[in-house]
Image (spheres, rainbow, N blue to C red):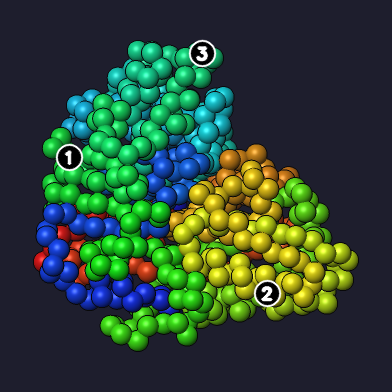
């Protein structure tokens, strides 16, 4: 397995603000609540069961379904890729010096909760849906899958050989076909009216392939009510059984799970927009993983002075790979990079980091997060032109008054307050800033910028290896949501994705950062502060810093 860039590590500690209701939750045993399942409060937006779609990835669906939709690997608590031998094995085939070849073998016991075996069809569908080579599919990114030439296997076969293109040995290959990617191909085939997805994909039959793609995109959208297991089967220790009217999902032990049984019979996952805030206030949450300040009042999200004094003090945690950033549209008011740079000059990055990063230093890198050991050498080399507010520079560069609409997914009191702080600062430069609450992050409705975290997400995000998330700056990739185009940046990231040479990688990162700070498609702000943990009544709750969040091992959670 390849490793991410590794140099001297800079110690970074972020103070995590703990809201008053949550403090009680994390320190009390919630004795008044009947033991009818574990309540897990997240900031995910659960609109789909498919984590690989744009909505699933940006909304943080893996926080809920990482132990419901297993794969050949998962992300451990530090964001490192861990093989999942319950599902099967992935082994590099030796001998070919020009191509990466990986042999995938399903565990003979690997079965969806509806009784269907995992097989070649599921691998082929995953590749087709995420590769960008087949029309109709709308994945969150094509990173890695675009480098695969072939998936060789027969219908129903329980093994496959995956061959990457010549000179494209994708460095993060072990994360491919991992958790949340192996959606049930037999369900998509049935919905499309075909016997198997493999034949239409290989033949590129436009009619059947279009039907398969449409189902992959939206066929697993979540709606309130009981869940039909024939459409939503699981492959993990838990299965999805129902969706509440407000979007909360109930997971129950999967009777067909062949591995070690989960410790608890049921878990209710409370997403953003559900009654999760009330669950916190009522001290009913056993596990929490939210961006700090999500469920507070605006006043409560205004900075460290709002820190409550009751309960235990704020926890100190490694910030992980995620970074809050202001992503600019590259059309409309921000079509000219000079305008993006002018507005960036009035954004109070130091104040935002102090007040809303709770004492974190401003973050200056687009490709690498604070959890990466290369940060010490690189972070201080960039961002100096935007370290402090420079109103005369912003006003002079603009030469006119403009209106900037900044979108954020609600509820999110902290990010709403961040936009208010930006508005206050930039008003002196003739920039009128308007906050635009959204159900999902999008530029489609006239927004000029979005506040997002690493990987264009609004919930838990990132991984120890930054390769996948770097495709947010590759022209034409679905992750490039602001449609930023720079051929040299795209080429450098493409080389980064397949290189293990540390010196070359550092040079490529520097070249990309120089370009991104010049054209500024996004303005990094600070390490995203997250409140993570379990109540004193819980065991085996190990906070996770990656996009699967603390739910990475939810099958091991149990009450004392």
Q: What mark, if any, has residue 7 been given in the picture?
A: none
The answer to whether residue 367 of the structure is visible from this angle is: no
Residue 342 vs residue 35, the one in the foreground:
35
Residue at horizontal 87%, vertical 71%?
396
Residue depicted at 32% across the width and 22% down the height: 186
Please provide percent x and percent y for residue 165.
Answer: 54, 32
Q: Marks 2 and 3: in contact by CB < 8 Å?
A: no
Element marked by disc 3: helix
From the top left corner, tell me how far across and down residue 418 is, in percent.
Answer: 58, 70
Instruction: Sort mark 3 into few (<14), some (14-19) or many (20+) by Cα contacts within 10 Å.
Output: few
Badge number at residue 207: 3
Q: In the image, what residue occupies the spot 62% across and 78% down?
A: 350
State the SS at label 2: helix
Can residue 307 be seen here? The reply is yes
**Residue carrying label 1:** 254
Q: Vertically, is 110 above or below 290?
A: above
Residue 394: x %, y % from top left: 80, 71
């Amino acid at each position: 397995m390849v490793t991410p860039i590794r140099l001297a590590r800079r110690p970074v500690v972020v103070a995590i603000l703990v809201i008053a209701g949550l403090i009680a939750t994390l320190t009390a045993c919630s004795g008044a609540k009947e033991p009818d399942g574990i309540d897990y409060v997240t900031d995910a937006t659960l609109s789909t069961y498919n984590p690989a779609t744009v909505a699933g990835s940006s909304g943080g669906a893996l926080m809920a379904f990482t132990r419901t939709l297993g794969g050949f690997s998962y992300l451990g608590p530090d964001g490192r890729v861990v093989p999942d031998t319950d599902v099967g094995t992935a082994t590099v085939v030796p001998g070919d010096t020009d191509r990466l070849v990986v042999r995938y073998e399903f565990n003979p016991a690997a079965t969806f909760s509806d009784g269907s075996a995992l097989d070649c069809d599921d691998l082929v569908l995953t590749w087709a849906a995420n590769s960008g080579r087949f029309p109709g599919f709308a994945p969150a990114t094509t990173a890695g899958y675009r480098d695969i030439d072939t998936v060789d296997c027969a219908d129903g076969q329980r093994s496959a050989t995956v061959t990457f293109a010549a000179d494209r040995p994708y460095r993060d290959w072990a994360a491919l076909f991992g958790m949340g990617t192996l959606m049930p191909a037999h369900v998509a085939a049935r919905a499309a009216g075909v016997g198997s997805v493999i034949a239409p994909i290989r033949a590129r039959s436009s009619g059947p392939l279009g039907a398969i793609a449409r189902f992959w995109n939206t066929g697993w959208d979540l709606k309130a009510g009981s869940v039909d297991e024939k459409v939503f089967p699981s492959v993990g220790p838990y299965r999805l059984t129902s969706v509440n009217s407000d979007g909360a999902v109930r997971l129950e032990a999967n009777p067909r799970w062949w591995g070690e049984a989960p410790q608890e019979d049921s878990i209710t996952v409370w997403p953003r927009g559900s009654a999760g805030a009330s669950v916190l206030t009522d001290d009913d949450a056993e596990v929490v993983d939210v961006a700090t300040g999500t469920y507070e009042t605006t006043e409560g999200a205004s900075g460290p002075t709002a820190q409550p004094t009751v309960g235990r003090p704020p926890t100190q945690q490694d910030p992980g790979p995620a970074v809050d950033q202001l992503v600019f549209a590259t059309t409309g008011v921000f079509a000219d990079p000079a305008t993006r740079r002018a507005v960036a000059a009035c954004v109070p990055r130091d104040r935002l980091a102090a007040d809303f990063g709770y004492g974190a230093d401003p973050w200056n890198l687009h490709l690498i997060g604070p959890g990466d050991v290369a940060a010490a050498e690189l972070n201080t080399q960039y961002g100096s032109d935007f370290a402090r507010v420079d109103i005369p520079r912003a006003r002079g560069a603009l030469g006119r008054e403009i209106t900037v609409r900044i979108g954020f997914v609600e509820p999110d009191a902290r990010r709403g307050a961040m936009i208010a702080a930006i508005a206050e600062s930039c008003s002196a430069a003739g920039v009128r800033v308007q906050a635009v609450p959204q159900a999902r992050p999008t530029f489609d409705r006239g927004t000029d910028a979005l506040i997002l975290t690493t990987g264009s997400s609004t919930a838990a995000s990132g991984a120890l290896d930054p390769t996948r998330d770097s495709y947010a700056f590759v022209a034409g990739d679905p992750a490039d949501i602001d449609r930023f185009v720079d051929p040299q940046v795209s080429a450098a990231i493409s080389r980064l994705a397949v290189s293990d040479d540390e010196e070359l990688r550092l040079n490529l990162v520097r070249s990309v950062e120089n370009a991104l700070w010049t054209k500024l498609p996004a303005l990094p702000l600070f390490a995203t502060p997250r409140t993570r943990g379990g109540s004193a009544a819980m065991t085996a709750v190990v906070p996770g810093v990656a996009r699967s969040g603390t739910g990475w091992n939810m099958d091991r959670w149990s009450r004392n």
